[in-house]
Image (tube, grey):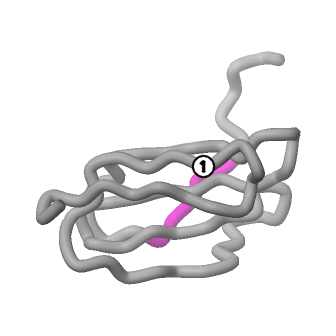
Amino acid sequence: MTGDLIDILSGHTAPVSSLCFAPNFEPILISGGWDSTIKVWNYTQKNKVNETLSVNSEVTSIDIHSNGKDAIVSTLSG
């Protein structure tokens, strides 16, 4: 590993507050932001958003269950 920047994932319209990689080496990254969205990325495909989910408030924290299929999200509104 070189530490070189290889890509920039664009899509959120406000700051990203949380990131989480899927377990078991699946190429999935979930991001949550102050734009009240959660984005599911396949990071092996250049700038590829697989899904965008809207939530009721700004995302403060996100985590992926060990099964790799469920996510837990915390927002400012609870």
Q: Which quarter shows the N terminus?
A: top right
Q: Is residue 77 left or right of residue 37?
A: left
In the image shown, does 13 or 19 lie closer to the viewer? Answer: 19
Q: Which residues are magenta?
A: 7-11
Image position, residue 59 (x, y; %): 28, 59
Q: Which quarter shows the C terminus?
A: bottom left
How many labels, in total?
1
**Looking at the image, which residue is at 27% across and 72% down?**
36
Residue 68 within the segment the image draws in magenta: no
Image position, residue 43 (x, y; %): 75, 56
Q: Is residue 5 left or right of residue 46?
A: left
In the image shown, does 3 or 50 lie closer to the viewer? Answer: 50
Instruction: Say few, some or many: other residues with alpha carbon within 10 Å of mark 1 (under 14 / 14 to 19 / 20 or more).
Output: some
Residue farthest left in this picture: 77
Q: Is residue 41 left or right of residue 11?
A: right
Image position, residue 14 (x, y; %): 26, 64
Residue, disc 1: 64
Label 1: element kind = strand
**Looking at the image, which residue is at 26% across and 71% down?**
35
Which SS does the magenta portion mostly show? loop
56 shown above or below 1: below
- Amino acid identity at mark 1: Ile
Image position, residue 26 (x, y; %): 85, 50
Q: Is residue 70 left or right of residue 54?
A: right
In the image shown, does 39 or 1 lie closer to the viewer? Answer: 39
**Looking at the image, which residue is at 23% across and 59% down?**
75
45 shown above or below 63: below
